[in-house]
């Protein structure tokens, strides 16, 4: 599956990309911000990919101008509660502090709420990652659980909260916005 929006392409993760993703995931740019911070071996990455239930997990490679640069997902979807967990990481440092992660996130959230018809997304964020927390709050996420014994805080956003919060952001991006297009 391919999703085109805001000049971004999200393409379903395939086996040919899992080694690239593993290298990104093990890098010092990404690993310190992840819940699981151990080094991931190639065989473990292959096993993880083989066990993914595709109907409940949507992982996409983020591309911009033909350059593969990161991974974004909605995973562990519970179809009864219409909720999944969203996440992203950027594997190439030259894209970390650009508009590209913002555009990829908007594209994924539009897909989750408009195409998958989810009602809620959850996110798990390091408590000291203030930049990411601020961004998620701007998207309508709200804190639902902060445990002083854990390094992570939990956030969630409903479809309506996202629509309301992202309206101004999307309006600013209006000139860039390409029609949302989904390819099988």
Image (tube, rainbow, N blue to C red):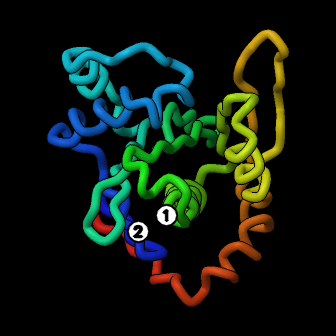
User: How many numbered dots are placed on residues in this image?
Assistant: 2
For residue 55, what is the image quadrant?
top left
Instruction: State the SS at label 1.
Output: helix
Badge 2 or badge 1: first in the primary sequence: 2
Mark 2 surroundings: few (<14), some (14-19) or many (≥20) residues within 10 A: many
Residue 163: image location, x then y, percent: 73, 66
State the quadrant of the C terminus.
bottom left
Residue 117: image location, x then y, percent: 58, 56
Residue 30: image location, x then y, percent: 46, 34
Whether 69 is drawn above or below 149: the answer is: below
At horizontal 31% and vertical 56% (from top left) the residue drawn is 11
For residue 140, what is the image quadrant?
bottom right
Q: Name the residue under label 1.
A: 100
Residues at discs 2 and 1 in contact (Cβ within 8 Å): yes
Left or right of 45? Residue 83 is: right
What distance separates the C-alpha of mark 2 from that of mark 1?
Answer: 8 Å
Q: Which residue reaches farthest top?
A: 149
Left or right of 145? Residue 171 is: left
> Closest to the observer: 129 or 10?
129
Instruction: State the SS at label 2.
Output: strand
Mark 1 surroundings: few (<14), some (14-19) or many (≥20) residues within 10 A: many
Q: Mark 2 points at which residue?
A: 8
Residue 19: image location, x then y, percent: 21, 33
Q: Which residue reaches farthest left?
A: 16
Left or right of 53? Residue 122 is: right
């Amino acid at each position: 599956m391919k999703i085109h929006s805001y000049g971004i392409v999200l393409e379903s993760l395939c086996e040919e990309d899992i080694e690239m993703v593993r290298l990104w995931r093990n890098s010092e740019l990404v690993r310190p911000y992840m819940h699981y911070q151990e080094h991931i071996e190639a065989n473990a990455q292959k096993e993880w990919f083989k066990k993914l239930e595709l109907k409940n997990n949507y992982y996409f490679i983020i591309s911009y101008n033909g350059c593969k640069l990161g991974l974004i997902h909605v995973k562990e979807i519970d179809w009864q509660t219409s909720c999944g967990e969203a996440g992203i990481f950027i594997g190439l440092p030259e894209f970390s502090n650009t508009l590209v992660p913002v555009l990829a996130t908007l594209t994924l959230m539009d897909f989750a709420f408009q195409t998958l018809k989810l009602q809620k997304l959850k996110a798990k964020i390091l408590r000291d990652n203030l930049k990411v927390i601020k961004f998620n709050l701007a998207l309508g996420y709200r804190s639902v659980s902060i445990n002083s014994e854990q390094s992570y805080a939990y956030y969630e956003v409903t479809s309506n909260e996202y629509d309301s919060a992202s309206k101004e952001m999307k309006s600013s991006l209006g000139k860039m916005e390409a029609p949302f297009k989904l390819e099988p």
